[in-house]
Image (cartoon, rainbow, N blue to C red):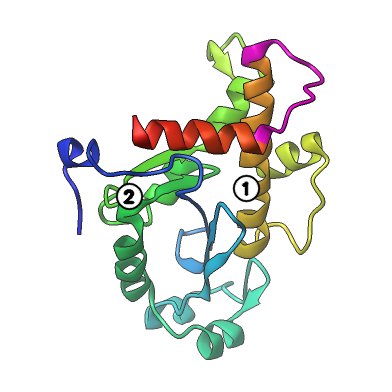
Amino acid sequence: MQFTKSQKNYIPINRIQNRLYLDIESTIDKTPVEVTLIKYSGEVICDQIIKPHDEFFNKLNQKAHVGLTDNILLNSGKLNWFEMERILSNLFPSYIVVAWNLEFEKDFFSDRLDSAFSTNCEMKRFADYYQDYNPFYEDYNWKSLKFAAEHFGIEVNGSYHRSHTDAELLRQISIRLDKELFHQRLGMKNPTYDFNKLIKVSSENKING
C-alpha cells in the first residue's frame, strides 16, 4: 500500500525510531545478490541472499560477488529480487528508509522507494557534516561508508560490502550524525546531557504536536 503525499502528513510517525537502514549488495552490472534491513533499535528484520535470474549464471567472470560464490547464490538464495522487492515494499510505508548512497539503492526498486514514508541519504548528510568542499563542483565531496566509520571510530564487525555489515555501520553512523549535528546546532563541543533522552522527547512532541 502506498500513501499520497497529503495522506503522509497525517500518519503518526516517529522520525527517529521509525527508521529502516537499508543496504543492497550487487554485482558490477547491478544484479542484487544480498539485502539487509535493520531497525533504529538494531533489530535485524531482513538479511537475505538473493537468488539471481537463471541467465545470470551463464555470464563470464561471474564466479564471486562481494564474497558470494555461484554455489552460495544457487543454494542459499530462496527468493529472487522480484519477490523480495514486493516483500520490502510492503514493509516501507510506515518507515523512513535510510541508505548510504540513496540514489544507488533506489535504482533497484521499480517505484524508486516511493512506497516508503520518506527516504534519507546519509552519504549526503555526512558530506554536509564533514564539509570537504570541492570548488570544481561547488559542493562538498561525498565520502565512503568506510571513511565515515573510521572518522567516528566505529568498530567493523564483518567484511565491508556485505549487506549486514554495511547496514549496521550505516545505522551506527546515522545515530552518531544525529548527535554531532545536534551538538553543532547548539554550538556545544562536550555536552553533558542525555542526548537519547532529548531525542525521545523531541520525537514524541513532533508526533503529539
Mark 1, Cα crowd under 10 Å, few <14 / some 14-19 / many 20+, is many
Closer to us: 202 or 80: 202
Q: Position of residue 196 (x, y in %)?
A: 65, 38
Q: Which residue is mark 2?
A: 116
Real-space Cα separation, disc 1 to disc 2, in angstroms: 18 Å
Question: Which amino acid is tagged 2?
Answer: Ala
Q: Is residue 148 left or right of residue 141?
A: right
The mark that comes first in sequence, 1 or 2, is 2
Q: Residue at x 19, y 37 (%)?
A: 5
Q: Position of residue 14 (x, y in %)?
A: 42, 43
Which quarter of the rendered picture does the N terminus lie within? bottom left
| Image quadrant where residue 100 sits | top right
Which quarter of the rendered picture does the C terminus lie within? top left
Q: Position of residue 187 (x, y in %)?
A: 70, 10
Question: Which amino acid is tagged 1?
Answer: Leu
Closer to us: 26 or 197: 197
Magenta residues (range): 185-195
Task: Look at the numbered disc 1 and give the secondary structure of its residue.
Answer: helix
- In the image, which disc is placed on residue 170? 1
Q: Are marks 1 and 2 in contact (CB under 8 Å)?
A: no
Mark 2, Cα crowd under 10 Å, few <14 / some 14-19 / many 20+, is many
Q: Is residue 187 magenta?
A: yes
